[in-house]
Amino acid sequence: MVGEKCGVFGVKCYGDDNAFVYLYWGLVAQNHRGHESYGFLTHSEGLRRYVDLGLVPRIDKQEFLRWNILLPGKVGIAHVRYGTSGHKDVYAHLKDAQPMVVSRGREKLGLGFNGNLVNIGWLRDIITQKNGRLKTTSDTELLCRYLVDNASNGIRESIRLCMENVEGAFSVVGLTSKGEFFGFRDPLGMRPLCLGQSRDGSIKAISSESVGMNINGFDVVNEVKPGEMILFREGGIERERLVKDGRSAFCGFEFAYFARPDSIVNGRYVYKVREEFGRNLGRRYREVVKDADLIISIPETADDAAYGLHEETGLRWERSLRRHRYVTQRAFILEDNERTSTIDRKINVIDGSMRGKRVIVVEDSIVRGDTTKTIIRKLRERGAEKIYLLVTFPRISNPCFYGIDMASFTELIGFYLDEDGIAKEIGADKVCYQPLEDFIRATGMRPGDLCMACITGNYPTELAQRIADKVRSSVEKSDKGRIYERLGLEV
């Protein structure tokens, strides 16, 4: 399993409603985007903040009254986090939790951020020269301080400078000490962000995914455009594309893994795209299908693709792998020596359904190979005769600099091994990836509008490309951490 980024949500109520209840449900709907921490920031005669570790907690009807007193106000932002930067200990997790608030004089700015910054060396230098020592280890503090340091001419100008000078992926919600609520998306639109509103238009909201709107009974208006800023004024919203790059680079991994299946991306339900991935696999690998007795899927992001494969081939889809719902630790967060035992606990194999069978296992992606290897071992122990692994996301062989937790070559099994080598390493009889052209066609997007750099090695931003090209030829297996930080190549 791999980790990514975060989820953001923000809301402004133009009537009598308080913001908190909408913020809460907007986070609950997006808790899949971050299990490390959660947080809320509202405005009522100043900023009111609450952050904590773990999943968004269950709140009953009576507790909502207490939370509305703790976090009053008709406007607010919220955030769930999985950190792709910063230290991995409890104290650091809590310090790095978002929304993050920074001050400059009397001005305060709160920010919820989904993404990752590439030119952090340059950004860190200019921020520390003005502000001294940083208080956290997160990219978010750098972005937040850059915005507040340049806000003397208003938040619009500050956001414009951010879009022009900061390289990376960022979908952002923000709130000032004056109660100004805003959101914006990087010029390439790498991370998802959408605008919505209540049926009567009295409540406006921004969410990483459309499910944050659905759970609140809001309509999705549309996706925030790359390079677009939205300001929520008292008289309504103000939208402006501050930077027009002329292209987009939306993260393809959202379709394969991160986005909830009932979210809408680029006008299409994600589960429909994943079903098409499965049909593609069935058409591409007919010989494998002919030699198989049944299909199973690694829950839950591969389930829709398995259904598509079943529809295309007529081969039985057996739900023989089940996830333990209340084992919530995510393997990508853990140290190497903890991953296998956690995966063992999370996935249960139903006894009796595998014995003597030739099995197609559908998987959404292979990054490090830990999850897949453990599951295949468990299938062998249950008596599977042959295991064919069909993978919806093409082979990952390059790191991501834009917010997915695979920031070095060394952790990628696909960097060192081809399909045959991967099959041997994880214990499968054969590994078959969906070809890149099939993947892109199924998304409904144009090839030039997707970031598939982790597959192709062609990065949509200049510095990321330079770093990858420089490091690729000198990788050592002991290398760890974001390669541009470790080698000082970010400036």
Image: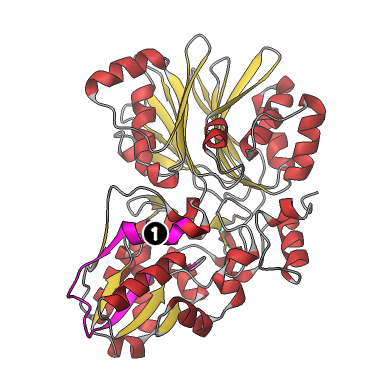
Q: Is residue 132 visible?
A: yes
Q: Is residue 360 magenta?
A: yes
Question: Which stretch did the figure color magenta?
Answer: 338-366
Location of residue 292 with respect to 192 vertically, above or below: below
Q: Is residue 408 magenta?
A: no
Q: Which residue is mark 1?
A: 341
Q: Quadrant of residue 207?
A: top left
Residue drawn at the location 57% of the way across and 14% of the way down: 178
Q: Is residue 313 left or right of residue 205?
A: left
Q: Quick one: 423 or 391, which is closer to the camera?
A: 423
Q: Is residue 333 left or right of residue 472?
A: left
Q: Residue 400's spot in the image, x, y percent?
A: 61, 58
Q: Quick one: 160 or 408, which is closer to the camera?
A: 408
Q: Amino acid at mark 1?
A: Ser
Q: Residue 28's spot in the image, x, y percent?
A: 35, 37
Q: Quadrant of residue 318?
A: bottom left
Q: Which quarter of the rendered picture does the N terminus lie within?
A: bottom left
Dot 1 crowding, Cα within 10 Å, few <14, some 14–19, many 20+? few
